[in-house]
Amino acid sequence: MIRSVLVANRGEIARRVFRTCRELGISTIAVHSDADAGAPHVREADTAVRLPGDAPADTYLRADLLVRAARAAGADAVHPGYGFLSENAAFATAVADAGLTWIGPPPAAIEAMASKTRAKELMADAGVPLLAPVDPGQVTAAELPLLVKAAAGGGGRGMRVVTELDALEGELKAAAAEAAAAFGDGEVFVEPYVVGGRHVEVQILADGHGTVWTLGTRDCSLQRRHQKVIEEAPAPGLSVELRSTLHQAAERAARTIGYRGAGTVEFLVDRTGRAYFLEMNTRLQVEHPVTEAVYRLDLVALQLSIAEGSPLDAAPPRPHGHAVEARLYAEDPAAGWQPQTGTLHRLALPDGVRLDSGVTDGDTIGVHYDPMLAKVIAWAPSRDEAVRKLAGALERTRIHGPATNRDLLVRSLRHPEFTDPGALDTGFYDRHLAELTDSGTGSDSDSGAEGVALFALAAALADAHGRSRFGGFRNVPSGPQAKTYTGAGTEHTIRYRLSRDGLRAEDFPGVRLLTLGPDEVVLEVDGLRRQFTVSRYGDRVHVDAPPTPGTPTTPTSHTFTALPRFPDPTARTEPGSLLAPMPGTVVRIAEGLTEGDPVEAGQPLLWLEAMKMEHKITAPLAGTLTSLPVQPGKQVEVGTLLAVVTD
């Protein structure tokens, strides 16, 4: 019997495992870097062990420190979560050698699937369909497009789509460099890139007594940078024959390597309905909650039971209904998916959906880890109902802090192409990102009563009430009050008068003020009652409102920054300056690039790494590189000068 578990991970997955452990009466042990000393997973654990340092390489990726921590804290078992060392056979072996129970597959099974190239060889021998690898030295234009992939790791790191033959060599080098930096292994391989393909996977669960469950399918086709954004179970629109093929192939894969525990076999399904093996993840997946919702299971509890040696039932339970999960990231999709940092002041969801999160109100979103804030999961009897439920919950969610992808998620779930299962494929965001991130907020008439300027008016009125002991009203005639904000990429100057006769606001004819307080403003707009909740954090103002019928893709919240009346004249930068858009580390500079070199507009100059992603910094215009004050390995803050390109 397992009595205490150390989770060799952090954030959302650590909290998820702890939740099940508490329900089973199992003591919980957390590990944490210095950056995570006050993190929720540390606060919730019965015991916590410090891993000195901030960077993952010095903390969560140190197998020796993790094993030492487990022994020091008196753990019976180690759960690896996902990411970090969850698919590291050497770590699994070290845990077992220390006399601890490893809550995962046997090291040999992990090793068999650790390299995607070796995994493909094993699956070919087992009769599992797959894409044949391509020799990069013999490629012809007829074989394009191609996909360059890292042999180790996952999460989209070391992956490149190649559409031009001349670009292949450069992309091979770039993918290898990224893979080496991320996984310590620069091996890459090339395979055909299937245009219009779907990412479909099968959840498996195997015990030590010969039973293998295949728990349906999941569709994970909506991806950015080859990383999943929205997942659902079961995968919609698959024929009975294709589902059977996928289940049989997944079971063969598990039996071939003597698998035990929870795992996922991933496939690419082309437009003709043919499936190809991609890889096997020898761990719990981020998207496991949708399978739990449909099968009414606790996969973590089953992992623990299997690790204790208990058998599974002969057959899994029957599935019920449909579940959809959305990953809420601190990122700006319109700015190249740039991760965002800062304080998460508030994250509040309506009832009726499941929230798996690694953060709570007041936590700081830093640069060291993945920018995922939470996973939001909705279940309903049908797909249409589940999608509607999830979109509505996200729409009503209050998020005060860094920019997030919340509006993108709502618009994605309501996009006609997503609601049509036959149209799903991994190119969704390649085709639709521009329209999904178009704010459409140049003036308040762009979206009627939902216009961003109306939210700015609510912010200004609430601010006036908060500053005045008379509630913002004046008994004597005066000039209009003015307040300027930036938000949604636009500057908004709100001019208004408040008197005993009511509100008179420029550019808002017919808008009536019904209620005014420091945190709430109620307006009547075109006969509709509109309620706004206003929250302030320093010079940042968050304004939330309920959704309005007939505007299903219009944002229900806006964030503004109040501008000072007298701007600082010294806040200037030299033309052509490239400033760090986020905190991070300079990982590499374009080969051979030095000060004085001519550069072309859009030419890559250097790469920043932040929150487990690489971000390319390019020349804003054609000219001369007149300054390059950074080197690989340099840590930079937001606004740090990276380079100057002179026209």
Image (tube, rainbow, N blue to C red):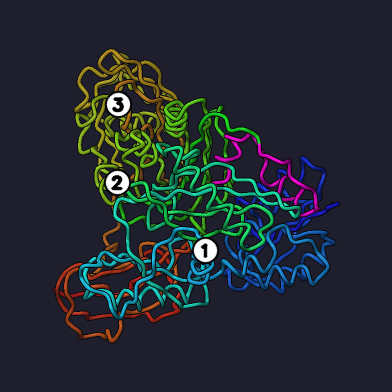
Which residue, given by chain and number where applicable, does mark 2 sit on? 565
Which residue, given by chain and number where applicable, does mark 3 sit on? 551
Which is closer to the viewer, label 1 or label 3? 1
Residue 290 included in the magenta stretch of the image = yes
Q: Position of residue 62 (x, y in %)?
A: 65, 72
Q: Position of residue 106 (x, y in %)?
A: 70, 64
Q: CA distance from mark 1 to mark 3?
A: 49 Å
Counting residues from the N terminus, which is met first, the one under dot 2 or under dot 3? 3
Q: Position of residue 126 (x, y in %)?
A: 54, 62
Q: Are there few (<14), some (14-19), or many (20+) residues within 10 Å of tag 3? A: few
Q: CA distance from mark 2 to mark 3?
A: 34 Å
Q: Residue at x 52, y 27 (%)?
A: 380
Dot 3 lies on which element?
loop
Dot 1 lies on which element?
helix
Q: Are there few (<14), some (14-19), or many (20+) residues within 10 Å of tag 1? A: many
Tell me the kind of residue under disc 2. Answer: Arg
Judging depth in this view, the residue of 558 and 77 nearest the camera is: 77
Q: Is residue 127 above or below residue 596?
A: above
Query: Magenta stretch?
Result: 287-316
Which residue, given by chain and number where applicable, does mark 1 sit on? 123
Tell me the kind of residue under disc 3. Answer: Thr
Judging depth in this view, the residue of 117 and 252 nearest the camera is: 252
Res. 364 visible in picture: no
Counting residues from the N terminus, which is met first, the one under dot 1 or under dot 3? 1
Tell me the kind of residue under disc 1. Answer: Met
Q: Please state if 619 lies on the left or on the right of 129 as rendered.
A: left
Which is closer to the viewer, label 2 or label 1? 1
Q: CA distance from mark 2 to mark 1?
A: 66 Å
